[in-house]
Amino acid sequence: MAIHPTAVIDPQAIIHETAEIGPYTVIEGKVSIGADTVVSSHAHISGPTVIGARNRIGSFTSIGAPPQDIHYAGEPTELIIGDDNLIREYASLHRGTVAGKGRTVIGNNNMFMAYTHVAHDCVVGNRTIMANVATLAGHVEIGDHVSLGGLVAVHQYCRIGAHTYVGGLSGISLDVPPFVIIAGTRNRMRISGINKIGMRRSGMSRENINKLEEAFRIIFRSPNLLLNDALAKVKEEIPDCPEVDLLVEFFQSSKRGVVKRTVED
């Protein structure tokens, strides 16, 4: 274990023997840090927080701070971070609230660039990228393989589906369906098509990408079909495709409403 002598470590903290803790880092409360995780100088980690293996935590990050919620009264909520995440300088990831899930959950292999923020009770999947200053309000859910451009702001309780690319400077106030490219702010949000490049990079088959493209055409390019009818048509005409099933289920489970406007609307 390599802990710099200037680091301040709470006796309650459990740090794996292969982890590294940089100069002037402060670790307070019930914090667990896994194998081969590296914490750079001046980071501040508060508990209850669980950090997995092989994470890279940058300088001046704030990990596991209390939620920015006026109703929070010091309850022992938590932050859980998986493995192989890159958390760059000045990023902030907050614990959950009792009124929410009680925990904020970060998956594996994610990249949080400088000044990104993940608020209380958020759930972030695997292999996501949040570019500089992208911000998630409370209770946001982000699927796997999502990319958020710089300065993207996501309203509380919104969901962003898997394999979605959100353009920089966007303001998201409705659920964003999986597999799409989207940009814009609030009532100006527009979907330009499916995220073919992102899906290819993640290893999705050409056949399933083609099926998603057809599903997109039915849902988004059929002005004479009501949404429920379009979803039913997709299920009937494109069976046995897990990605298409996920797209349909996302619409059916939405509570906030899903962005359906396209650049041609």
Image (cartoon, helix red, strand yellow):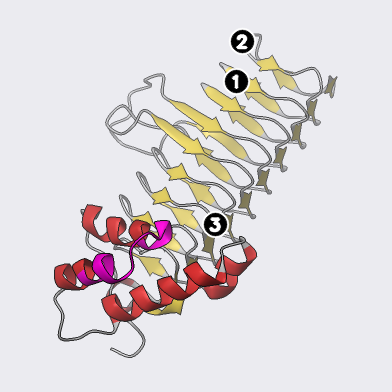
Q: What kind of element bears circle 2?
A: loop
Whether residue 165 sits left or right of residue 111 in the image: it is left
Of 110 and 200, nearer the camera is 200
Q: Which mark is residue 255?
A: none
Image quadrant assignment for residue 23: top right
Q: Of circles 3 and 1, which is in front?
A: 3
CA distance for labels 1 and 2: 7 Å
Whether residue 121 sits left or right of residue 114 in the image: it is left
Q: Which mark is residue 145?
A: 3
Residue drawn 70% across the image and 30% down it: 53
* Location of residue 67 in the rendering, given as x and y in whole percent from the top left corner: 41, 35
Q: Residues within 10 Å of mark 1 (few under 14, many from 20)?
A: many
Residue drawn 28% across the image and 71% down it: 237
* Location of residue 75 in the rendering, given as x and y in whole percent from the top left corner: 36, 20
CA distance for labels 3 and 1: 28 Å
Q: Amino acid at mark 3?
A: His
Q: Which mark is residue 12?
A: 2
* Location of residue 195 in the rendering, given as x and y in whole percent from the top left corner: 50, 72
Magenta segment includes 53: no
Residue range of the region highlighted in magenta in the rendering: 233-244
CA distance for labels 3 and 2: 35 Å
Q: Are marks 1 and 2 in contact (CB under 8 Å)?
A: yes
Which residue extends farthest bottom?
Answer: 264
Magenta segment includes 234: yes
The residue at which mark 1 appears reads as 31
Residue drawn 45% across the image and 31% down it: 66
Q: What kind of element bears circle 3?
A: loop
Of 237 and 256, nearer the camera is 237
| Upstream in sequence: badge 3 or badge 2 | 2
Magenta: main secondary structure equals: helix
